[in-house]
Amino acid sequence: MSRILRELVDRRKHYIIDYLIAAKHYKKGEQHLYELTLTDLEIEFARLKNRKE
């Protein structure tokens, strides 16, 4: 079960990172996107989507 969960988390992180990079978002402060947790990425993703609406 944990392997499946890890794969799902990794896929979601990859999707969000690709979306943020396409929107020219490369870092959050001094941290690169790949260093962020899924929760941090979700927050950035939501913030960017709200800005576009």
Image: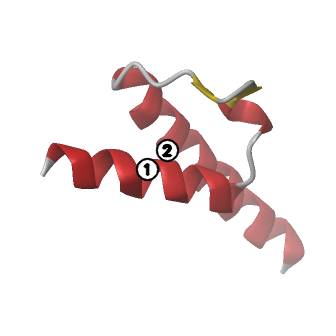
> Which label belongs to residue 31?
none
Crowdedness near tag 1: few (<14), some (14–19) or many (≥20) residues, C-alpha within 10 Å: some
Residue corresponding to mark 1: 45
The image shows residue 7 at horizontal and vertical percentages of 72, 58
Q: Quadrant of the N terminus?
A: bottom right
**Residue type, numbered disc 1:** Phe
Judge from the rendering whether residue 29 lies leftward or rightward of residue 43; answer left or right: right
Q: Are marks 1 and 2 in contact (CB under 8 Å)?
A: yes
The image shows residue 52 at horizontal and vertical percentages of 17, 44
Secondary element under disc 2, as helix, strand or loop, is helix
Judge from the rendering whether residue 9 lies leftward or rightward of residue 35; answer left or right: left
Crowdedness near tag 2: few (<14), some (14–19) or many (≥20) residues, C-alpha within 10 Å: some
Q: How is the image coloured?
A: secondary structure
Residue 2 figure quarter: bottom right
Judge from the rendering whether residue 3 lies leftward or rightward of residue 31; answer left or right: right
| Residue at x 55% of width, y 21% of height | 26
Secondary element under disc 1, as helix, strand or loop, is helix
> Which label belongs to residue 16?
2
Q: Nearer the viewer, residue 3 or 13?
A: 13
Q: Residue furthest right?
A: 2
1 or 2: tag closer to the N-terminus: 2
| Residue at x 40% of width, y 35% of height | 19
Q: Nearer the viewer, residue 2 or 20?
A: 20
